[in-house]
Amino acid sequence: MRKKVDIINIKMIIKKVIAKRVKDSRGEATIQIIVQTSDGKFKTSAPSGKSVGKYEAKPYARDLNSDISIINNLNAKKINSLIIKKFEDLTKLEKVVKNKIGANSLFALEASLLKALACENEKELWQFLEGKTKKLPRPICNIIGGGVHSRGIKGKKPDFQEFLFISNAKTIEGCIKVNKIAHRFAYKLLRSQKKNDEGAWETNRSNEEVLEIMNVIKKKIKKKFNENLVIGIDAAASSFFKKTYNYKNPKRELSENKQIEAIKGLIKGYNLYYVEDPLNEDDFAGFKELNKEKCFIVGDDLTVTNPKRLKKAIKMKAINGVIVKPNQIGSLLKVKEVIALAKKAGIKTIMSHRSGETEDDTIADLGVGFGCDFIKTGIYGLVRESKLKRLVKIEKGLKR
Ligand code: PEP
Ligand code: MG
């Protein structure tokens, strides 16, 4: 029998909130938060980015250690007295911890609390977020990589960060199967032995050469398995922008206007379906120009899961797709707001992992629960596959 605390009129009793440091896939320290209630322990680990947008919220208020000690000193009785019963009650929590902890800590704390609430309500997290499984987010998978996520081969790598495939198979399992084959084909064609931070293959080839290879893979998969793939990129252009775009492979310098022309050329030349951060994070006007193309023009560093920046992008018609990385902003209330704003404006939403990940699969539930159109998870390695496995479980109606 569960204990009831009538004075505060809720069943869920938080016994303890524990914060600790764990390692992410890059071996770097990140925060894990465990909310212990009468129902059990509910934990979430925060990821971390490498191509971090300059407008992202800081991961920790001062540093990881001080956030850990602030959270470990949170008084469980005080949180219980806030009476957090529904998603919107997170406002009450945010009033207490506002400015005291960073975005990584706030994300992990809120997600753990929601997991506890979902359990209390005998629901899965995605169901608690009022999700309906009508349509699950389609996986976007990173096959070949360059940019800051890759070390390169003999000092060379593509300047763009991610070369992506999206399968239109009917089920998540079907998409995973096709994406795995594509990843394997890329290995054969590149003869690469090296995988980058997100499990994508490293290469010394240029952006254009990689796109040629992506086209070959796409055609092979169509011919052999009759499966359709579309090609995407995440240029992560802020990472090589400094007044001009400074490409290294091959070496060239492009003005802001020339970069727009170059991206337009790639969209047409390779029939790109999805283009993330093609321009630097301040160039709303340039994004607007690209958004006239028949392609998804997606903001990540541009919008940083921040309602204010998304509102600006909407007003300027700068994008038709937006990346949602919960730890870019920390507050899940804001994450929900960003997704609602995007949906209202007809902008597709892409729930996304970070380059430094743990096996935590919370983003799968968030992607389904908030009704995102796509989810970026990568395809290779335990920390990437954990999110996909969770999606498959949700698809099959299975519990955690
Ligand atoms: C990205 O740019 O989409 C990404 C996942 O990179 P990071 O996590 O390094 O910001
Ligand atoms: Mg990105």
Image (cartoon, helix red, strand yellow):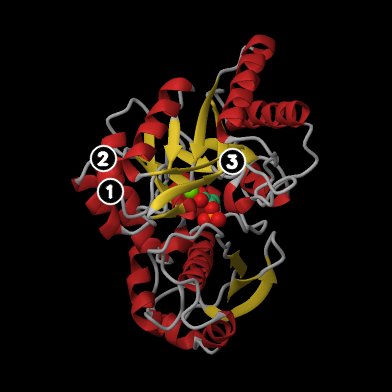
Whole-percent x, y for residue 349 in the image: 39, 42
Query: Which residue is farthest front?
Result: 252
**Quadrant location, the N terminus:** bottom right
Mark 3 and mark 2 lie on one chain; the one further toward the N terminus is 3
Q: Is there CB contact under 8 Å for labels 2 and 1?
A: yes
Residue 64 quadrant: bottom right
The number of callouts visible is 3
Instruction: Please give the residue where the numbered disc 2 appears in the rendered image.
Output: 288
**Which amino acid, by three-letter code, is at mark 3?**
Asn
**Numbered mark located on residue 108 in the image:** none
Q: Which residue is drawn at 74% across and 26% down?
A: 189
Where residue 373 appears, as percent x and y from the top left, is: 42, 37
Circles 3, 2 touching at the beta carbon (< 8 Å): no
Residue tagged by mark 1?
A: 284
Horizontal arrangement in the rendering, residue 87 relative to residue 228 (left or right) = left
- Viewer-closest of 388 and 265: 265
SS for dot 3: loop
Residue 370 is situated, as x and y percent measured from the top left of the image, at 41, 48
Label 2 environment density (alpha carbons within 10 Å; few <14, some 14–19, many ≥20): some
Mark 2 residue's CB less than 8 Å from ligand 2:
no
Tell me if I can see residue 395 in this picture.
no
- Please name the residue shown 44% across and 62% down the image: 328
> Residue at 38% of width from left, 39% of height from top?
259
Query: What residue would you read off at disc 3?
Result: 249
Disc 2 residue type?
Answer: Lys
User: Residue 337: image x %, image y %?
Assistant: 31, 56
Q: How much space separates mark 1 and mark 3, taking CA atoms?
A: 26 Å
Marks 2 and 1, Cα distance to the nearest angstrom? 6 Å
- Measuring 72% from the left and 65% from the top, which residue is drawn there? 27
Q: Nearer the viewer, residue 355 or 42?
A: 355
* Mark 2 residue element: helix
Q: Nearer the viewer, residue 236 or 133?
A: 236
